[in-house]
Image (spheres, grey):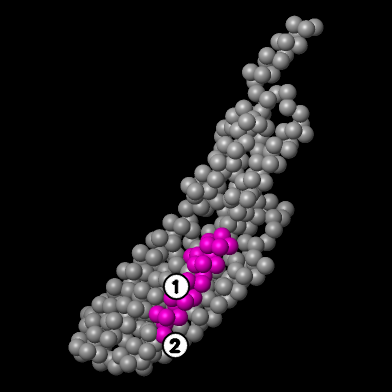
Amino acid sequence: MDTQIKTRAAIISVISNLFLMTAKFVAGVLSGSISVISEAIHSGNDLVAAVIALFAVKESSKPPDEEHPFGHGKIENISGTIEALLIFVAAALIIKEAIEKIRFGGETMEPTWGLVIMGVSTVLNLVVSNYLLKTGREHHSIALEADGMHLRTDVYTSLGVFIGLLLIKITGLQIIDPIAAIVVAGLIVKAAYDLTRKAFVPLLDTSLEEHHLQEVQYVLAEHHYLYVEYHDLRTRRAGREAHIDLHLVIDARTSVQEAHDLCDSIEKSIGERVPFSSVLIHVEPDAEIKTIAGAAGRQEF
Protein backbone atom coordinates (compact mmCIF):
# COMPACT_ATOMS: atom_id res chain seq x y z
CA MET A 1 0.00 0.00 0.00
CA ASP A 2 2.82 2.41 0.93
CA THR A 3 4.55 1.84 -2.43
CA GLN A 4 1.27 2.25 -4.34
CA ILE A 5 0.57 5.62 -2.71
CA LYS A 6 4.06 6.92 -3.48
CA THR A 7 3.93 5.58 -7.06
CA ARG A 8 0.56 7.25 -7.67
CA ALA A 9 1.96 10.58 -6.43
CA ALA A 10 4.99 10.27 -8.72
CA ILE A 11 2.77 9.45 -11.74
CA ILE A 12 0.58 12.51 -11.05
CA SER A 13 3.75 14.63 -11.04
CA VAL A 14 4.83 13.22 -14.42
CA ILE A 15 1.42 13.92 -16.00
CA SER A 16 1.27 17.43 -14.53
CA ASN A 17 4.75 18.36 -15.76
CA LEU A 18 4.12 16.94 -19.24
CA PHE A 19 0.99 19.07 -19.57
CA LEU A 20 2.64 22.24 -18.26
CA MET A 21 5.78 21.85 -20.39
CA THR A 22 3.69 21.54 -23.56
CA ALA A 23 1.34 24.38 -22.64
CA LYS A 24 4.16 26.76 -21.66
CA PHE A 25 6.14 26.06 -24.81
CA VAL A 26 3.10 26.73 -27.04
CA ALA A 27 2.23 29.90 -25.07
CA GLY A 28 5.86 31.05 -25.22
CA VAL A 29 5.99 30.69 -29.01
CA LEU A 30 2.60 32.38 -29.48
CA SER A 31 3.47 35.28 -27.16
CA GLY A 32 7.16 35.57 -28.06
CA SER A 33 8.06 35.68 -24.37
CA ILE A 34 11.52 34.45 -23.35
CA SER A 35 10.37 34.19 -19.72
CA VAL A 36 7.51 31.87 -20.69
CA ILE A 37 9.82 29.76 -22.89
CA SER A 38 12.25 29.69 -19.96
CA GLU A 39 9.43 28.34 -17.81
CA ALA A 40 8.79 25.69 -20.47
CA ILE A 41 12.46 24.67 -20.18
CA HIS A 42 12.04 24.57 -16.41
CA SER A 43 8.96 22.35 -16.74
CA GLY A 44 10.82 20.08 -19.17
CA ASN A 45 13.49 19.83 -16.52
CA ASP A 46 10.77 19.06 -13.97
CA LEU A 47 9.40 16.33 -16.23
CA VAL A 48 12.77 14.58 -16.36
CA ALA A 49 13.07 14.95 -12.59
CA ALA A 50 9.55 13.53 -12.09
CA VAL A 51 10.37 10.48 -14.22
CA ILE A 52 13.56 9.96 -12.17
CA ALA A 53 11.52 10.28 -8.96
CA LEU A 54 9.02 7.69 -10.24
CA PHE A 55 11.86 5.27 -10.96
CA ALA A 56 13.46 5.97 -7.56
CA VAL A 57 10.21 5.40 -5.65
CA LYS A 58 9.70 2.02 -7.29
CA GLU A 59 13.31 0.87 -6.89
CA SER A 60 13.79 2.09 -3.31
CA SER A 61 10.77 0.08 -2.15
CA LYS A 62 12.37 -3.22 -3.16
CA PRO A 63 13.40 -5.42 -0.23
CA PRO A 64 17.09 -6.12 0.54
CA ASP A 65 18.73 -8.73 -1.66
CA GLU A 66 22.09 -10.49 -1.98
CA GLU A 67 23.66 -7.60 -3.89
CA HIS A 68 22.07 -4.89 -1.71
CA PRO A 69 21.83 -6.37 1.81
CA PHE A 70 21.05 -2.95 3.33
CA GLY A 71 18.19 -2.30 0.91
CA HIS A 72 17.79 0.22 -1.93
CA GLY A 73 16.96 3.34 0.09
CA LYS A 74 19.83 5.48 -1.18
CA ILE A 75 18.36 5.39 -4.70
CA GLU A 76 16.02 8.16 -3.50
CA ASN A 77 18.98 10.28 -2.38
CA ILE A 78 20.69 9.75 -5.74
CA SER A 79 17.44 10.73 -7.47
CA GLY A 80 17.18 13.93 -5.43
CA THR A 81 20.81 14.83 -6.18
CA ILE A 82 20.25 14.35 -9.93
CA GLU A 83 17.15 16.53 -9.71
CA ALA A 84 19.18 19.29 -8.04
CA LEU A 85 21.81 19.15 -10.80
CA LEU A 86 19.06 19.35 -13.43
CA ILE A 87 17.66 22.45 -11.73
CA PHE A 88 21.10 24.12 -11.91
CA VAL A 89 21.25 23.31 -15.65
CA ALA A 90 17.78 24.77 -16.21
CA ALA A 91 18.77 27.98 -14.41
CA ALA A 92 21.90 28.32 -16.57
CA LEU A 93 19.86 27.91 -19.78
CA ILE A 94 17.32 30.51 -18.65
CA ILE A 95 20.03 33.06 -17.78
CA LYS A 96 21.75 32.47 -21.14
CA GLU A 97 18.53 33.08 -23.10
CA ALA A 98 17.63 36.16 -21.05
CA ILE A 99 21.07 37.79 -21.48
CA GLU A 100 20.93 37.22 -25.23
CA LYS A 101 17.54 38.93 -25.40
CA ILE A 102 18.84 41.89 -23.36
CA ARG A 103 21.92 42.22 -25.61
CA PHE A 104 20.33 41.66 -29.02
CA GLY A 105 16.68 42.42 -28.39
CA GLY A 106 13.80 40.34 -29.66
CA GLU A 107 10.46 40.47 -31.35
CA THR A 108 7.67 42.51 -29.79
CA MET A 109 5.64 40.15 -27.67
CA GLU A 110 1.95 39.79 -26.91
CA PRO A 111 1.66 38.57 -23.30
CA THR A 112 -1.99 37.42 -23.23
CA TRP A 113 -1.34 33.73 -23.88
CA GLY A 114 1.54 33.77 -21.43
CA LEU A 115 -0.64 35.34 -18.73
CA VAL A 116 -3.27 32.61 -19.11
CA ILE A 117 -0.80 29.72 -18.99
CA MET A 118 1.26 31.18 -16.14
CA GLY A 119 -1.92 31.64 -14.10
CA VAL A 120 -2.93 28.02 -14.70
CA SER A 121 0.63 26.85 -14.00
CA THR A 122 0.80 28.67 -10.66
CA VAL A 123 -2.40 27.07 -9.38
CA LEU A 124 -1.69 23.56 -10.73
CA ASN A 125 1.89 23.51 -9.41
CA LEU A 126 0.71 24.69 -5.99
CA VAL A 127 -1.82 21.83 -5.76
CA VAL A 128 0.57 19.13 -7.04
CA SER A 129 3.58 20.32 -4.98
CA ASN A 130 1.50 20.36 -1.79
CA TYR A 131 0.34 16.81 -2.56
CA LEU A 132 3.88 15.57 -3.25
CA LEU A 133 5.36 17.19 -0.14
CA LYS A 134 2.58 15.83 2.07
CA THR A 135 2.90 12.31 0.62
CA GLY A 136 6.71 12.43 0.79
CA ARG A 137 6.73 13.43 4.46
CA GLU A 138 4.03 10.96 5.49
CA HIS A 139 5.75 8.06 3.73
CA HIS A 140 9.36 9.16 4.30
CA SER A 141 10.23 9.51 0.61
CA ILE A 142 13.16 11.80 -0.20
CA ALA A 143 12.41 11.43 -3.93
CA LEU A 144 8.84 12.72 -3.57
CA GLU A 145 9.91 15.51 -1.22
CA ALA A 146 12.58 16.55 -3.73
CA ASP A 147 10.02 16.52 -6.54
CA GLY A 148 7.62 18.54 -4.39
CA MET A 149 10.32 21.11 -3.58
CA HIS A 150 11.16 21.21 -7.28
CA LEU A 151 7.55 22.03 -8.16
CA ARG A 152 7.23 24.49 -5.29
CA THR A 153 9.89 26.63 -7.00
CA ASP A 154 7.67 26.55 -10.09
CA VAL A 155 4.87 28.14 -8.08
CA TYR A 156 7.06 31.15 -7.30
CA THR A 157 8.69 31.35 -10.71
CA SER A 158 5.37 31.04 -12.57
CA LEU A 159 3.90 33.74 -10.36
CA GLY A 160 6.96 35.94 -11.02
CA VAL A 161 6.61 35.49 -14.79
CA PHE A 162 2.88 36.20 -14.53
CA ILE A 163 3.56 39.50 -12.74
CA GLY A 164 6.26 40.38 -15.30
CA LEU A 165 3.90 39.73 -18.23
CA LEU A 166 1.18 41.75 -16.55
CA LEU A 167 3.58 44.69 -16.18
CA ILE A 168 4.52 44.39 -19.87
CA LYS A 169 0.86 44.47 -20.85
CA ILE A 170 0.32 47.57 -18.70
CA THR A 171 3.54 49.48 -19.47
CA GLY A 172 4.64 48.06 -22.84
CA LEU A 173 8.25 47.75 -21.61
CA GLN A 174 9.63 44.61 -23.29
CA ILE A 175 12.85 44.64 -21.21
CA ILE A 176 10.80 43.40 -18.24
CA ASP A 177 10.54 39.96 -19.86
CA PRO A 178 14.26 38.94 -19.79
CA ILE A 179 14.69 40.61 -16.38
CA ALA A 180 11.82 38.49 -15.04
CA ALA A 181 13.51 35.41 -16.54
CA ILE A 182 16.77 36.18 -14.69
CA VAL A 183 14.88 36.63 -11.40
CA VAL A 184 13.21 33.26 -12.06
CA ALA A 185 16.65 31.70 -12.60
CA GLY A 186 17.89 33.11 -9.28
CA LEU A 187 14.99 31.49 -7.41
CA ILE A 188 15.69 28.21 -9.20
CA VAL A 189 19.37 28.26 -8.14
CA LYS A 190 18.34 28.78 -4.50
CA ALA A 191 15.96 25.81 -4.71
CA ALA A 192 18.67 23.68 -6.32
CA TYR A 193 21.10 24.49 -3.51
CA ASP A 194 18.56 23.58 -0.80
CA LEU A 195 17.68 20.35 -2.59
CA THR A 196 21.35 19.40 -3.01
CA ARG A 197 21.93 19.68 0.73
CA LYS A 198 18.84 17.62 1.56
CA ALA A 199 19.48 14.84 -0.97
CA PHE A 200 23.27 14.60 -1.22
CA VAL A 201 24.38 14.92 2.41
CA PRO A 202 22.80 11.56 3.48
CA LEU A 203 24.95 9.84 0.82
CA LEU A 204 27.90 10.69 3.10
CA ASP A 205 26.30 8.59 5.86
CA THR A 206 25.46 11.53 8.12
CA SER A 207 23.57 10.78 11.34
CA LEU A 208 19.79 10.82 11.66
CA GLU A 209 17.86 14.04 12.12
CA GLU A 210 18.09 15.44 15.65
CA HIS A 211 14.48 14.61 16.57
CA HIS A 212 14.90 10.98 15.51
CA LEU A 213 18.19 10.72 17.38
CA GLN A 214 16.42 12.01 20.49
CA GLU A 215 13.75 9.33 20.06
CA VAL A 216 16.45 6.63 20.06
CA GLN A 217 18.01 8.08 23.21
CA TYR A 218 14.58 8.29 24.86
CA VAL A 219 13.95 4.58 24.23
CA LEU A 220 17.33 3.70 25.71
CA ALA A 221 16.54 5.84 28.76
CA GLU A 222 13.24 3.97 29.18
CA HIS A 223 15.15 0.68 29.45
CA HIS A 224 18.03 2.03 31.55
CA TYR A 225 17.27 -0.14 34.59
CA LEU A 226 17.78 -3.32 32.51
CA TYR A 227 21.38 -2.64 31.43
CA VAL A 228 24.56 -1.06 32.79
CA GLU A 229 25.33 1.42 30.01
CA TYR A 230 25.48 1.87 26.24
CA HIS A 231 28.15 3.38 23.98
CA ASP A 232 29.23 3.73 20.33
CA LEU A 233 25.72 4.76 19.22
CA ARG A 234 25.82 5.29 15.45
CA THR A 235 23.04 6.24 13.04
CA ARG A 236 22.76 6.92 9.34
CA ARG A 237 20.06 7.64 6.80
CA ALA A 238 19.57 5.81 3.46
CA GLY A 239 16.51 7.23 1.73
CA ARG A 240 13.66 6.48 4.10
CA GLU A 241 15.64 3.75 5.86
CA ALA A 242 17.20 4.60 9.26
CA HIS A 243 20.14 2.41 10.28
CA ILE A 244 21.02 2.40 14.00
CA ASP A 245 23.65 0.40 15.86
CA LEU A 246 25.07 0.54 19.38
CA HIS A 247 26.96 -1.43 22.05
CA LEU A 248 24.89 -2.40 25.10
CA VAL A 249 26.66 -3.34 28.34
CA ILE A 250 24.65 -5.70 30.57
CA ASP A 251 25.16 -7.59 33.81
CA ALA A 252 27.49 -10.53 33.13
CA ARG A 253 25.11 -12.80 35.03
CA THR A 254 22.26 -12.09 32.58
CA SER A 255 21.19 -15.15 30.59
CA VAL A 256 21.33 -15.25 26.79
CA GLN A 257 17.51 -15.36 26.66
CA GLU A 258 17.19 -12.30 28.91
CA ALA A 259 19.73 -10.37 26.81
CA HIS A 260 17.89 -11.38 23.65
CA ASP A 261 14.51 -10.27 25.05
CA LEU A 262 15.98 -6.93 26.15
CA CYS A 263 17.40 -6.25 22.69
CA ASP A 264 14.08 -7.21 21.07
CA SER A 265 12.24 -4.79 23.35
CA ILE A 266 14.62 -1.92 22.55
CA GLU A 267 14.47 -2.62 18.82
CA LYS A 268 10.66 -2.75 18.84
CA SER A 269 10.38 0.53 20.77
CA ILE A 270 12.81 2.30 18.43
CA GLY A 271 10.88 0.95 15.42
CA GLU A 272 7.67 2.48 16.81
CA ARG A 273 9.31 5.89 17.20
CA VAL A 274 11.63 5.95 14.17
CA PRO A 275 9.83 4.66 11.05
CA PHE A 276 11.62 2.20 8.73
CA SER A 277 14.46 1.71 11.18
CA SER A 278 16.93 -1.17 11.23
CA VAL A 279 18.56 -1.63 14.66
CA LEU A 280 21.69 -3.66 15.41
CA ILE A 281 22.72 -4.11 19.08
CA HIS A 282 26.06 -5.58 20.14
CA VAL A 283 25.78 -6.99 23.69
CA GLU A 284 28.78 -6.81 26.03
CA PRO A 285 29.11 -8.20 29.61
CA ASP A 286 29.95 -5.71 32.34
CA ALA A 287 33.67 -6.24 33.01
CA GLU A 288 33.53 -5.17 36.68
CA ILE A 289 30.70 -7.52 37.60
CA LYS A 290 32.35 -10.34 35.70
CA THR A 291 35.60 -9.81 37.62
CA ILE A 292 33.84 -9.67 40.98
CA ALA A 293 31.84 -12.80 40.16
CA GLY A 294 34.99 -14.62 39.10
CA ALA A 295 36.85 -13.64 42.27
CA ALA A 296 33.90 -14.75 44.42
CA GLY A 297 33.85 -18.08 42.62
CA ARG A 298 37.55 -18.65 43.27
CA GLN A 299 37.14 -17.84 46.99
CA GLU A 300 34.27 -20.29 47.33
CA PHE A 301 36.33 -22.94 45.59
Residue at 25 percent across and 77 percent down: it is 179
At x 45% / y 80%, what residue is drawn?
124
Q: Quadrant of residue 68?
A: bottom right
Span of residues in magenta? 120-147
Closer to the N terminus: mark 2 or mark 1? 2
Taken as a whole, is the magenta stretch helix, strand or loop? helix
Residue visible at 52% across and 53% down in the picture:
203
Which residue bears the numbered disc 2?
A: 23
Work out whether residue 227 can be spotted.
yes
Q: Secondary structure at mark 1?
A: helix
Q: Quadrant of residue 11?
A: bottom right
Q: For numbered disc 2, what is the local secondary structure?
A: helix
78 or 255, which is in the foreground?
Answer: 255
Is 159 on the left or on the right of 265, as rendered?
left
Q: Amino acid at mark 1?
A: Leu
**Percent of width and height locating residue 257:** 77, 34
Q: Alpha carbon of mark 2 to alpha carbon of mark 1: how far?
A: 16 Å
Q: Position of residue 222 (x, y in %)?
A: 60, 38
Residue at mark 1? 151
Q: Quadrant of the N terminus?
A: bottom right
Relative image position of residue 57 (x, y in whole percent): 60, 66
Label 2 or label 1, whichever lies nearer to me, is: 1
Mark yes or no: residue 44 visible: no
